[in-house]
Amino acid sequence: MLPVGPHAVSPIGIRGTRILLDGELRPACLHLRNGTIAAISAFHEVPDEMPVVEAGNDVVMPGQVDPHVHVTEPGRTDWEGIAWATRAAAAGGLTTLFDMPLNSIPATTSVSALHEKRDAARASAIVNVELIGGVVPGNSDALTALHAEGVRLFKCFLVPSGVDEFPCVSVADLRAAMPILAALGAPLLVHAELPEHIAPMPQGDPCQYATYLASRPDVAETSAIALMIGLAEEFGTRVHIVHLSSAQSLPLLREARARSVDITCETCPHYLTFAAEGIADGATALKCAPPIRSRENREQLWRAVLDGEISMIVSDHSPCPPAMKSEAAGDFFDSWGGIASLQLGLPAVWHEARARGASLPLVAERMSAGPAALASLAARKGRLAVGYDADVVIWNPDADVWVDDLTLYHRHPLTPYRAQPLTGLVSATFVGGVPVFRDGRIEHESRDGAAGGVSSSA
């Protein structure tokens, strides 16, 4: 990582009546110095020489950590790119993102590709960017070298990824890679669907969401998760299931953890917000894989989030040029499968969480502390505590939010949240103690890693 150095950061205080400390909101003042939280004092205890940001009654929380973002640079910068993605992240209160190894050219499956992606990101990131390594057929010999370069998270697909540069793995490939990752202590992030259960073009109208949903049934996901549980148990590899969509998988994961299998999972705002019954014909902005399932399935996912079976909520931000979404034709099978939501995760999740009686500390746990723990960053990120990185978001959890082109920092303003009521407006985001977003505008433009940084994955 290339953090802001001590010479570049002036001390600053953030004072408010609702600062999240040790799981509760209380009055306090954060003292940010040299990129970290140097002290936490009572509300009125602020050094005379320190400038203070007054948060008032807004909530002050740790910045979000998102280990599932598709940034698409280099090679497909017209899809998103570091400059757009990190600005959208800052506007949404997200201070650390992890770039998935695919959708860029080259894919991050070798050390040379890692260096190319790192160089592409270094000049334009305004939040912390971490790079995830890929597991693809034939690259098991590269995993140790990637890890030595700082990569701590690795990703594979059990089904075609959608891009030729990142092929899916077989069981034989997993058997070659997983012992290496186990020895390294590095988690394997898995897109868990098995291709034999997926119908590329089933009978039915391709413009009807029900047709698309039927093509990727729950069993594609549950069978893949059962496979990964068995391999995780065999090799002792830490496995993390990305974008869990099917609540039918939860008992499998519960039973595996009861046997001490090291397996965790995440879900995404779109699985917690939308339901298949409400997706209109031709609404391809909502196409993703695995698919958004039923209303009852959504409520089961929420129960798992609330009780901790699902330990984190991440964006799976997967943007593309609007033409690739095939909105005019409305064909779900011709459309790119991905949802753009990087800036909108916090208000989307909070809108639904609040309706179910969830607390702000729980949301922070699932969107900050939980993801930080996945990547072994829990000693530095995901909490507001002395010695932690000064990555902070200030936001109003009572403000209504409506998405429009003027406030959305994604390269392309195509998102299913455009017509969705959201709750929670970010007023300021600090990365390493530097304000990068404040009062509706980008506050700090990065050059050569300032106000953030780029690393491999931890």
Image: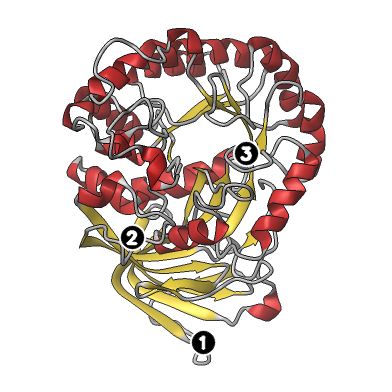
Residue 415 vs residue 45, the one in the foreground: 415
Q: Which residue is mark 1?
A: 50
Which element is circle 3 on?
loop
Give yes or no for contact between labels 1 and 2 (Cβ–Cβ under 8 Å): no
- Amino acid on which the number 2 mark rests in the picture: Leu
- Amino acid on which the number 1 mark rests in the picture: Met
Residue 143 vs residue 330, the one in the foreground: 330
* Mark 3 or mark 1: whose residue is earlier in sequence: 1
- Residue at (63% x, 24% y) in the render: 167
| Left or right for 343, reference 384 | left
- Any mark on residue 101, and which? 3
Crowding at label 1, few (<14), some or many (≥20) Cα neighbours within 10 Å?
A: few
The CA span between labels 3 and 1 is 41 Å
* Mark 3 or mark 2: whose residue is earlier in sequence: 2
Residue 228: x %, y % from top left: 56, 15
- Outermost residue to the bottom: 48
Nearest-to-viewer mark from 1 and 2: 1
- Residue at (69% x, 69% y) in the render: 448
Quadrant of the rendered image containing residue 172: top right
- Outermost residue to the top: 196
Nearest-to-viewer mark from 3 and 1: 3
Q: Is residue 414 above or below residue 251?
A: below
Residue 43 vs residue 19, the one in the foreground: 19
Give yes or no for contact between labels 3 and 2 (Cβ–Cβ under 8 Å): no
Residue 366: x %, y % from top left: 41, 43
Crowding at label 2, few (<14), some or many (≥20) Cα neighbours within 10 Å?
A: some
Q: Which residue is mark 2?
A: 25
Which element is circle 2 on?
strand
| Left or right for 339, reference 231 | left
Residue 42: x %, y % from top left: 41, 75
Give yes or no for contact between labels 3 and 1 (Cβ–Cβ under 8 Å): no
Q: Is residue 223 above or below residue 159?
A: above
